Image (cartoon, rainbow, N blue to C red):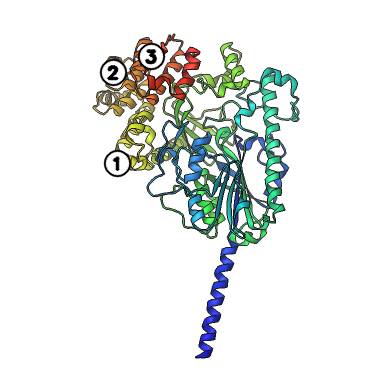
Amino acid sequence: MNKYYILLIFLLVLNACSEKETELERPNIVWITSEDNSKHYLKLFDANGVETPNIERLAAEGIIFRHAFSNAPVCSVARSTLISGCYAPRIGAQFHRKIQMVPMPDSLLMFPAYLRRAGYYTTNNSKEDYNLIKSDGVWDESSKNASYKHRKPGQPFFHVFNIGVCHESSLHFSESDMQQKITKTPLDAFTMQPNHPQTDLFRYTNAYYRDKIQEMDTKVGEVVADLAKDGLLEQTIIFYYGDHGGVLPGSKGYLFETGLHVPLVVYVPEKYRKQLQVEAGTDQNGFVSFVDFAPTVLALAGINIPTQMDGKPFLGNHIDPQEVAQRNSTFSYADRFDEKYDQVRAVRKGRYKYIRYFQPFIFDGLMNNYRYLQLAYQEWASLFQENKLNEIQSAFFRPHGAEALYDVEADPFETKNLVMEKSAELQELRMTLDNWIVGMPDLSLYPEHYLIDNAFKNPVAFGRQHRKDIKDYLMIANLGLEDLSSVSEALTKYLQSEDPWQRYWAIIACTNFAGTANTFQTKITDISQADPELINRVRAAEYLAIANFQNPVKVLTEALYASEEPAEALLILNEITLMASSTYGYDFNLNIQELDAGVKNDAEVKRRLIFLNGS
């Protein structure tokens, strides 16, 4: 019996030691996030970029992810995807800036809360910018002073460090700044992208931005040096990535590769490489996106991944790198950027990128106040007005088709639309995107103001309850992609539907045919005058204007004055801005005093009014 007890005690001690060893083997995890830069400006990822020696040193001891993507080209939507592991249009977090924050879906928590429950010390220094309501249990610290150094001795940690030196605001320099500041990057050290004007201002902006990228790299080095000083590098997995694409004109806020394709490097200490099947200095060509980051961190920490997350881990104890290498697709979304609406979805699969513009009459360069603080944006618009741009450079200011297809390996800046040349690829990617939209389902098939009033207390439950309706709205929207003769009868039926959002999408689909037929003129004229939904009157007047049937000013102005909801008024103002642009040329003289008090005091409405009325 004594031998038995001795053996039992030995086994218990061995088991306790084993558990202790497993706990100590849990890695620290650090995210170093740089704001507003795509992969195109780092030589590690693109020959046209600048040297980033600190990031390159991390890559030499880890993995370079050649195909990493933000799912959204703007911070709050991208960060909402990162913190939740969910596609933003499914959970109601797709609008930047938020007019109303939304709850996390079902019983899901922001992923650092699971780390914290498992014993990790969680810190964020310091930007959050979520469109989601945050519970109290997410961070131990989240502030400019947050640091993993405040943890208990031996406690594993998850730490986020945000670097803002390359943020969009860094390019809000003046003409006098240009004269006084000589860039470190030579003005002839790179090739400018073909859709940009090849001017001195654009070249200076490119060089200045590359300087900011190198300044950012210095900050990365400081974070890593601090970890080394504390003797933590051999226990810490480090992610470096950009929080979405770059900020040269036509990048941030757009579903082009320059707005989505981010640099990602993961440093893996030697002690974890065998377990994670990682070799130092290797490339991973499989596609990963922000929706995958949260489950990846949980997998690395040995924590079960909640089923409510949409993403899949790409690193972890039981993750096969060969399987990851086979992943070849990513989805992305754009809805509202500050005061500018433009509903767009995209899927990239391998070398091909498919973009679906749900309102193709809205051209990319529509006024967005914050974007146009950048001198290069201002010059681009001026050169278009002066007819000094070539066809590729002018496309930014012209309405486009409802669909675009690009071979992004042959055409990295997406200048040649292949929809007429690659029908098989077009059909495949269109179906892939449609299935994803319905599968979520995508709440943006409803206007934002309707979601605020009816869905945002529980967006996910609303989506589940209205999945069939969303599928129907998408089907109606897609009628605009077909031949007019084959869909005319169906569109006529939906224009008379009792469902306001069937009418909404039918009007937009008809707009794809505006100018080619007068089939819908009478019914859409009736909608513009008497529809119960103000936004349907606006969409109808917009159709009539684009088809050259009717001046839209009276309908749009009266709808704006009648609106009592800021998000609804903001969408109407978006269309007023469009109709007032040089592309359409209608004159509006808005009387601010006619606006509802709650509407005119909304921050995003004020942005539009500053542009339209100067007040």
Q: Residue at x 59, y 25 (%)?
A: 249
Mark 3 is surrounded, within 10 Å at the Cα level, by few (under 14), some (14 to 19) or many (20 or more) other residues, namely: some
Q: Say whether disc 3 or disc 2 marks the residue closer to the N-terminus.
A: 2
Disc nearest the viewer among 1 and 2: 1
Which residue is label 1 attached to?
465
Disc nearest the viewer among 3 and 2: 2
Q: Secondary structure at mark 1?
A: helix
Q: Nearer the viewer, residue 154 or 11?
A: 154
Residue 23 shown left or right of residue 480 in the figure = right
Which residue is label 2 attached to?
527
Distance of mark 3 from mark 2, alpha carbons?
15 Å
Q: Which mark is residue 85?
A: none
User: x and y percent of residue 166 in the render?
Assistant: 64, 33
Which residue is label 3 attached to?
547
Q: Say whether disc 1 or disc 3 marks the residue closer to the N-terminus.
A: 1
Q: Say whether disc 1 or disc 2 marks the residue closer to the N-terminus.
A: 1
